[in-house]
Each structure stands twice: as C-alpha cells, then as structure tokens.
Image (tube, helix red, strand yellow):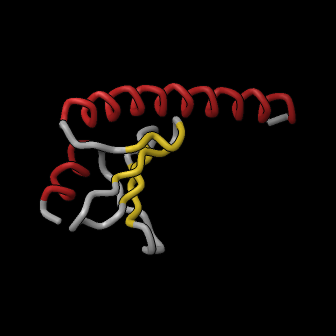
Amino acid sequence: MGDEDIGELYRAVRADKQKRHATYWEKNTEALESSGLTYRVASRECYCFREPQKPGVDFYPSTGRWRVVGWKYPMSGSAKKFLIWYSKQ
C-alpha cells in the first residue's frame, strides 16, 4: 500500500467519522431539547447541566458522552441514556 493509498484511506475514514458525529449531534440535541431540562450551551460541542441538588455535568452531543465535573473519566451512551442516568441523580 503506497502513501497515496494510505492518505486516501485516512480521508475516507475521517469523512465517515464526521458524518457519524453530525448525525449523533442532531439526534442527541433533539432528545435534550424535548426533555424539558435546562442547560447552557457552552459551545456546539458541550452542553452544561447545572441544577441545584444534582451533579454538574458536561454533555457532548456529537459523541453521546458526558462527564461529571471533577470526575476523571467520561460515561457514554446517548442522550436517552444520559437522561435516564441524570434523572436518577
């Protein structure tokens, strides 16, 4: 496999990943908007949930991952799984 083939393969994989993440972003954002929860959009990549009596959480809609502020590792799933988890907190 030559360098040109590797470059072509890399571009195809990257384009596929970008397409997947765009789809995840749309579905996750739609689910969060319909949930009725309040959150702050810090950027297109991060939504911040800061409710009293609940942990502060950053949700990343393009990957479906979320991280509790202060925790080292993120959790993953989708907006639906996040909403189930968050409602139990």
Q: Is residue 33 above or below residue 68?
A: above
Classify residue 37 as left or right of residue 9.
left
Q: Residue at x 20, y 30 (%)?
A: 34
Between residues 38 and 28, which one lies in front from this camera angle? 38
Where is residue 21 shown, x and y percent of the image? 48, 33
Between residues 16 and 86, which one lies in front from this camera angle? 86
Report the quarter where the C terminus lies.
bottom left
Where is residue 12 shown, x and y percent of the image? 65, 27
Q: Residue at x 42, y 63 (%)?
A: 74
Q: Is residue 84 above or below residue 1?
A: below
Q: Residue at x 64, y 33 (%)?
A: 14
Instruction: State the count of labels.
Output: 0
Q: Is residue 49 above or below residue 29?
A: below
Classify residue 69 as left or right of residue 89.
right
Instruction: Give the image quarter of residue 10.
Output: top right
Task: Return the residue found at the far right.
Answer: 3
